[in-house]
Structures are given as C-alpha cells and as structure tokens.
Amino acid sequence: MKILTLVWGPFGFRADELAEAVGSERVSITFLYGPRYFAPIRYLALFFKTLIILWQRRPDVVYAQNPPVFCPLTCLLYCRASGARLVIDHHSIWRVKTLGKGLLSRLLGFLEGVAARAAYANTAPHSYWADKLKVMGARRVEVVHDFVGRNPNPRDESLRKQYSTEPLMAMCSHGGHPLERIESEATAVGEVGGVALLITGPPAKLERRLSQFRMPEDVKYLGFLPRQTYESLKASVDMAVNITDEPYTLSHVLLEYAASSIPVISSRQGVLDDFFGDALLYTDSTRIEAIAEKVRQFKDPAVRDEYRTRIIRWYEALSASRPAEIATLRALLGLSAV
C-alpha cells in the first residue's frame, strides 16, 4: 500500500512523526509561503501543484494535514476520482483556533466539516480537537498525540559559553504567531537577572519583529539553528519558557522540551492542563510581572529539579502509550502492526 503524507508549508514536525509511523513519504508543497496577502495566489498554485503530484505518484492513501483546509479538500478531489482513501490529520481546527467567529471563520468551519465528514478517517493530536471533530460529524476519529524521540545529546558547557556567562540559561522557540508573547518573555527574563534567554525561530517571521524590540542585555535571538545545534542547545539549557495568548494551543515545541527533560514555564489553558497535568509550571497571566515571578521560582534549584522530575515522569508515560496509538493508526490505514 502506497501512502503519501502531504503538508502545505515548508515544514511540519507532526507530519514528519506521523509519516515515519506509517511508513509514508512526507511531501511539503510550498509557494509564496508567509504573507497573507499572497493567499489567493498561493492556494491556487498549491491546488494545481498538489493534483499534479498526486496523479504522478498515485498513492492508495493520502494523509493530508489541516490547516489549511484547502489541502485536504484538494486531496479529496484526487481521492474521489482515483478511489484512494483520504485521512486528514487536524493539526488544529482553523475556525476554532485562528479566525474567531466572523463570516470567513464560518465559511472555513463549513469547509472543515465537509472535509472531515468526507474523509475516510481523521486524526487529532489531543482529545479537545477530537471532540470538536466528532461534533462536526467526522468519521473514524482517533487521537494520536504528538511525540518526539528522546534527545540523546549531553549537556554541552562549551555551547553554553558561546552565548552567555550567566549561571542559568533559558530558551524559547517560536514560529512567529502574533499572539506569541516573545517580547514579554524577553522582558521578564531581563528583569529577573542572572538568566540568559536564547530565542530561536524562523527569521522570515521573527527577525523583523524582534528588530523593532529593544532586547535586554542577556537575551539573544539565534534565528533558525541547524538541527544538531538546536538539539544540543535543548540538552544544555536549564529551563524553557513558552508564553502565548493563542487559544487552544498545544505547541509542538513543548514535546521537544519534554523529550529533552527541560523544566518548562508555560501560559495556562485547558488543552495544556488536560495533556500535561502538573508537569509544567503554569502562569495564569501573560503579563510581564507574572512571567518574571515564575522565572524567579525556577532560579531555585529545588523547584527546577522538582519540575524536571515531573516532566521526565510525564514523558515516560507518554512513551509507554505511544506503541498502542501507532498500532491503532496503522490499523486505521489498513497496515499491519510493526
């Protein structure tokens, strides 16, 4: 059985993990990625490019990522014409997470419902999205949690010294969404003192934004690091910070931190409470002073050690449940167990 996993965008860590689990090739399809004003041209070009790729490769199963919903809808046309099966992975549900309750949101919500009901099956990274899909009438909904393999890298003192001589080092990794509170994180850490903050993420979305912000002295933007450097950095920091006002967000980077046994300060929301429980140190406010207070708590070695123990215990439980989820996913696609 030939499976093709499709993403409209230059990268998709969750799609990488799912494709590996089902033995699929993962294909990223991009055109004019980034600015919203290119969207009409971008989606039209991606529509034709996707159909060409599908007809050339003729997969039996197309595993398409939503959002944007236009990716699975395009794949649905191919599947209806070829007899292939469409499985949609709902990385998020666009109408709930991003666009509010306006006319465009309702239209996208309608299209997401059409795609979810027409697909052979649907997957979601957590139970919140799965419940939303079931309300929309989606068929064969399965939860397959995000998962990142354990970081094998050791703590690298020489790497730490490249960036700062402060006794403690924190990191935050962001994609550039406007509701990510990067400036608040940087200001809070700068106010506390004694902690260096290293920010990573794509220059296309962060460089200009951060150039307009006066960084505290020991806060540095590192850009999009080479993979090995990034993994080594995660193994070498003392804490991570992930603050956002995005609703219903379960950032993939939180799984990366867990796989690196990093204690994490995070903004609180229901999805995270449900998934991580007490493994994260939450702040109920994204105000600078509230974030700073949590950073001060993590300056205490005993508190850091407690939350490191919690995140390790949580990651071990997730690792133990992973084989059953993958077995269910493979059975859903008609594949044998591994």
Image (cartoon, grey):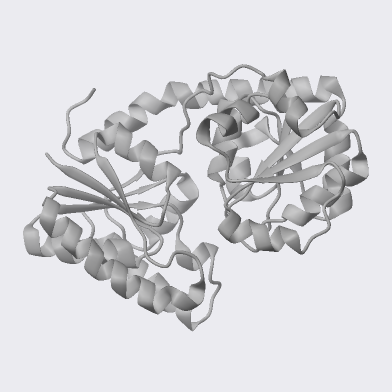
Judged left or right of residue 77, residue 158 is right
Is there any visible trace of residue 185 in the rendered image? yes
- Decide which of 158, 104 is in the foreground and name it: 158
Horizontal side of residue 194 vs 34, given as left or right: right
Residue at point 27%, 54% (across, down): 139
Q: Can residue 285 be spotted in the picture?
A: no
In the figure, 72 relative to 298: above or below?
below
> Residue 97's spot in the image, x, y percent?
53, 62
Which quadrant holds residue 159?
top right
Q: Is residue 113 left or right of residue 251?
A: left
Q: Is residue 21 above or below residue 292?
A: above
Q: Quadrant of the N terminus?
A: top left
Expressed as whole percent of the image width and height from the top left, the position of residue 8 reads 36, 59
Placement of 176 over or under 104, stated as above or below: above
105 or 31: nearer the viewer: 31
Residue reaching furthest to the bottom: 103
Could you tell me which residue is drawn at 67 percent across and 56 percent down? 180
Q: How many marks?
A: 0
Whether residue 164 sits left or right of residue 72 in the image: it is right
Q: Which residue appears at 71% of the width and 38% of the height?
A: 171
Residue 56 in the image: x percent, y percent? Answer: 12, 55
Q: Quadrant of residue 306?
A: top right
The quarter of the picture where the C terminus appears is: top left
Q: Is residue 11 above or below residue 303?
A: below
Q: Residue at x 68, y 54 (%)?
A: 244
- Residue at the farthest left position: 82
